[in-house]
Amino acid sequence: MHRDIAKVLIYKETIAARVAEMARQITADHSQPGEPDLGEVTIVPILTGAMILCADLIRHIPIEMKIGLLTVSSYPGSALQSRGSQLLGQQLGDIRGRHVLLLDDILDSGGTLKLVVPILKDLGAASVKTAVLLRKDRPAAKEVPVDYVGFEIPDEFVVGYGLDYNNYYRNLPDICVLTPEAIERKR
Ligand code: IMP
Ligand code: MG
């Protein structure tokens, strides 16, 4: 095990299986009569954290789609708690009349989704659905409506599979908790 990892919360095999399941659910939901066809859907990963989820998820969704990008920062630098979400950039294309599926790595304070969903609606999206890989066990996270959740996790700071600490550790394949020494060293 990587010396900076105190424990592995979710192993990569478990993540892969759940992401495939989420994709099946999303595909099925968008194939229902009366539901938007995925051909009219724009998938929007919130960068940087959701890039790996997006890459894995969309390869299990075998239907026409567009991709848009949004960059939001809420844990700048070595912050371990949200400092409030800020929109840093966007490359959405024209989403007027399109059904947007927003992807985020983790639902924590809910600030990111609360910031971004209204922006997408203001830009003319016909609908906005949300999917997160992880949801922390804290009241604020439970209050924010979200359509798809991969895993419920304890209220701990985690890294890996796109999630970072001070922009490190995104490449760890598992969802992990860091040692206090690593947090000190990478600050
Ligand atoms: P929220 O806006 O507080 O719901 O947090 C969502 C964003 O904060 C996510 O997109 C992550 O980028 C970041 N974040 C929240 N919790 C963690 C964590 O445990 N590790 C790494 N990043 C996190
Ligand atoms: Mg993020």
Image (cartoon, rainbow, N blue to C red):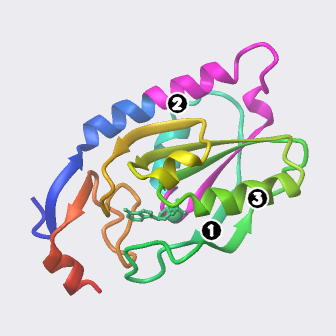
Label 3 vs 1, first from the N-terminus: 1
Residue 46 lies left or right of residue 118; in this view the side is left
Q: Which residue is mark 2?
A: 23
Quick one: SS at disc 3?
Answer: loop
Dots 3 and 1: beta carbons under 8 Å?
Answer: no
Q: Does the beta carbon of the residue at mark 2 sit less than 8 Å from ligand 1?
A: no
Q: Name which residue type carries label 2.
A: Ala
Q: Which residues are magenta?
A: 21-50
Q: Does the stretch in magenta take in 38?
A: yes
Residue shown at 59%/59% (left/top)? 46
Q: Does the stretch in magenta take in 41?
A: yes
Q: Is residue 26 above or below residue 120?
A: above
Label 1 vs 2, first from the N-terminus: 2
Quick one: SS at disc 2?
Answer: helix
Q: CA distance from mark 3 to mark 1?
A: 10 Å
Quick one: SS at disc 1?
Answer: strand
Which label lies toward us, 3 or 1? Answer: 1
